[in-house]
């Protein structure tokens, strides 16, 4: 009996290990040495983007910046600053009213149909509320990332090749959720769901992953895991991470570059270390006092 | 503070204020109550002998439900007729469900263009407004009274009903899930069959089965009214032709048992999905 309890504890310990510490990081080295991204090639140029939903109130106003290969780029700003809209303009989930976007040397705003879909396969996306199909398994949800490469019949009848399934399993294992492979997604915890979301983006083999408030619904531990994993993706695979964040400290800790947005305009674009109280008040307006916890 | 308070006719403080809709509803309720009372006084009771009427009805009910037995039809043939009725219901439901699911994709506002959605919804509202029996009789002009007209008529009404139910289930889907798949480069068909259908599967099954139960009931009535055959025709014959109360009771029990089995099966299926 005693032994059994002990065994069980051990097992539980192992499970916990497999579940929590999937990404063995030294938490002190929060920014690796190869942080110099200034010379990395530009993969997306965004210029003069305006977006107005109705009338002349602009959600985005003359947005222009470059996205470099392999960097972690955070977009911060108060609620309603246009962060989500900006993110969705990048993969054209939202059409900008004016401006141009060049991705891998091609103008994305003129793309249509098949071409647009193929552009989107190069840009993964993860969400605050994970946006998984709850009633499908983890496996199926990850494979949804491949639908952009499929024709209609293959997609409707879930015809994936063995090699594709194999790759999905590899990615799922790497993210530490292989135990949950056949579970329905509504049985997972928030952190696990977000990992499924990341796996779905990764299997697309994207150049850029857009993250819309990826940690806003997670507890601090799960948030750290997710942010560290996102950074690891950018380091190891050279995938660019563009992330909307509410949490200034997370943005400072994990990103190579920060863009500050206020009222639809870029008010800061630079190194996270150069952000001073003055910059923060420019980005967040009068909310300065509430923000500085340190 | 005082100026915010409203008082009623007797100077007491009101604790709520009715808006326009609530006032109209109150008027409607009062009107209905008055007409109900007046209606009772306007009925013609002259030919009615209350006591014999009550005992007679009770006698009939007793004959039906406490002494059920089959006289004109054998048990085997009655069972066969139940099967015929079930088949009519099944056929019209399954055909209706297949047609409806595609129409519902067009009718759901989040999956379609506004004008397509509006025209499909308008069309099915008109179809739904006309009772099933009427559709059966309309199709009887072309197909003649019988099973074919009954199935087509029931199918028509099933489609109208299911498109509304399905499209409302589709409209409940979290927009984010659709967005997530659009962002992977998925096509419209992928989104329909990888997000929309799996996510609403249990609703679809529940609504389809509910319609199946309704169609079973309608098919019984169609047997009598439109000569579609099945147990409804036997029921019509034994009640209106032979005045055989015992048989009416037995047939009613048979229909009831089938309905209960359907209900249980529906619950099992819904939980499994």
Image (tube, coloured by chain):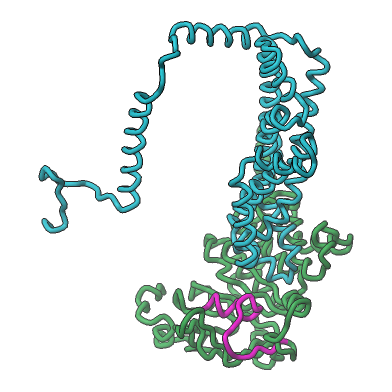
Q: Which residues are drawn in magenta? A: A82-103
In front: B140, or B128?
Answer: B140
Q: Which of the chains is green?
A: A
Residue A63 in sight from this viewpoint: yes
The question of residue A93 being in magenta is answered with: yes
Residue furthest out toward the front: B46
At which x and y percent is residue B150?
A: 74, 37
Going 61% across and 80% down the picture, which residue do you hit? A95
The answer to whether residue A139 is left or right of residue B248 is right
Q: Quadrant of the N terminus of chain B?
A: bottom left
Percent x, y for residue B126?
60, 51
Using the rendered image of the protein, determine whether residue A262 is visible from the camera's viewpoint: no
Q: Position of residue A190 (x, y in %)?
A: 59, 57
Query: Compared to A76, does B143 lie above or below?
Result: above
Image position, residue B4 (x, y; %): 16, 57
Q: Residue at x 76, y 71 (%)?
A: A204
Q: In the rendered view of the protein, which quadrant contains the C terminus of chain B?
A: top right
Position of B240 relative to B178 (above/below): above
Q: How many numbered marks have been drawn onto this rendered protein structure?
A: 0
Q: What residue sits 80% from the left and 62% below the top?
A: A155
Q: Is residue A104 magenta?
A: no
């Amino acid at each position: 009996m005693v032994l059994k309890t002990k065994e069980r504890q051990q097992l539980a310990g192992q499970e916990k290990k497999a579940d929590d510490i999937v990404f063995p990081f030294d938490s002190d080295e929060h920014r690796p040495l190869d942080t110099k991204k200034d010379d990395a090639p530009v993969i997306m140029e965004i210029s003069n983007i305006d977006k107005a939903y109705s009338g002349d109130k602009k959600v985005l106003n003359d947005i222009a910046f470059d996205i470099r290969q392999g960097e972690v780029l955070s977009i911060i700003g108060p609620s309603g600053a246009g962060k989500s809209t900006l993110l969705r303009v990048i993969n054209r989930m939202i059409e900008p009213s004016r401006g141009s976007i060049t991705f891998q040397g091609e103008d994305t705003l003129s793309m249509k149909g098949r071409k647009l879909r193929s552009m989107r396969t190069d840009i993964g996306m993860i969400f605050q509320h994970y946006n998984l199909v709850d009633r499908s398994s983890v496996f199926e949800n990850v494979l949804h990332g491949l639908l952009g490469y499929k024709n209609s019949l293959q997609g409707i009848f879930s015809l994936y090749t063995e090699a594709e399934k194999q790759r999905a399993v590899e990615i799922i294992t790497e993210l530490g959720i292989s135990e949950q492979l056949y579970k329905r997604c509504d049985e997972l915890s928030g952190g696990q769901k977000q990992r499924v979301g990341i796996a779905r983006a990764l299997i697309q083999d994207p150049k850029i992953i857009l993250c819309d408030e990826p940690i806003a619904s997670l507890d601090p531990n799960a948030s750290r895991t997710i942010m560290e994993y996102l950074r690891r993706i950018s380091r190891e695979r050279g995938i660019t991470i563009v992330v909307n964040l509410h949490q200034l400290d997370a943005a400072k800790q994990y990103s190579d570059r920060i863009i500050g947005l206020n009222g639809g305009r870029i008010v800061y674009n630079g190194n996270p270390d150069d952000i001073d109280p003055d910059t923060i008040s420019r980005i967040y307006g009068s909310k300065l006092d509430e923000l500085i916890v340190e | 503070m005082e100026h915010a308070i409203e008082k009623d006719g007797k100077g007491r403080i009101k604790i709520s204020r009715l808006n326009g809709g609530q006032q109209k509803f109150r008027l409607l309720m009062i009107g209905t109550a008055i007409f109900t009372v007046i209606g009772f006084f306007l009925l013609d009771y002259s030919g009615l002998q209350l006591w014999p009427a009550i005992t007679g009805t009770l006698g009939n009910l007793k004959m039906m439900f406490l002494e059920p037995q089959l006289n004109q039809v054998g048990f085997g043939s009655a069972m066969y007729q139940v099967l015929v009725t079930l088949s009519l219901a099944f056929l019209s439901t399954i055909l209706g469900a297949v047609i409806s699911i595609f129409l519902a994709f067009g009718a759901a506002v989040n999956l379609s263009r506004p004008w397509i959605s509006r025209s499909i919804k308008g069309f099915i509202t008109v179809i739904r407004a006309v009772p099933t029996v009427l559709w059966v009789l309309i199709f009887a002009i072309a197909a003649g009274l019988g099973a074919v007209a009954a199935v087509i008529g029931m199918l028509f009404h099933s489609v109208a009903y299911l498109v509304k139910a399905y499209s409302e289930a589709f409209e409940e889907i979290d927009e984010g899930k659709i967005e997530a798949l659009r962002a992977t480069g998925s096509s419209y068909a992928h989104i329909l069959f990888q997000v929309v259908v799996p996510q609403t599967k249990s609703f679809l099954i529940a609504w389809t089965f509910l319609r199946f139960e309704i169609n079973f009931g309608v098919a019984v009535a169609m047997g009598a009214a439109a000569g579609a055959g099945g147990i409804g025709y036997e029921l019509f014959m034994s009640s209106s032709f032979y005045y055989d109360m015992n048989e009416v009771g037995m047939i009613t029990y048979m229909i009831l048992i089938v309905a209960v089995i359907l209900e249980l099966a529906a619950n099992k299926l819904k939980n499994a999905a």
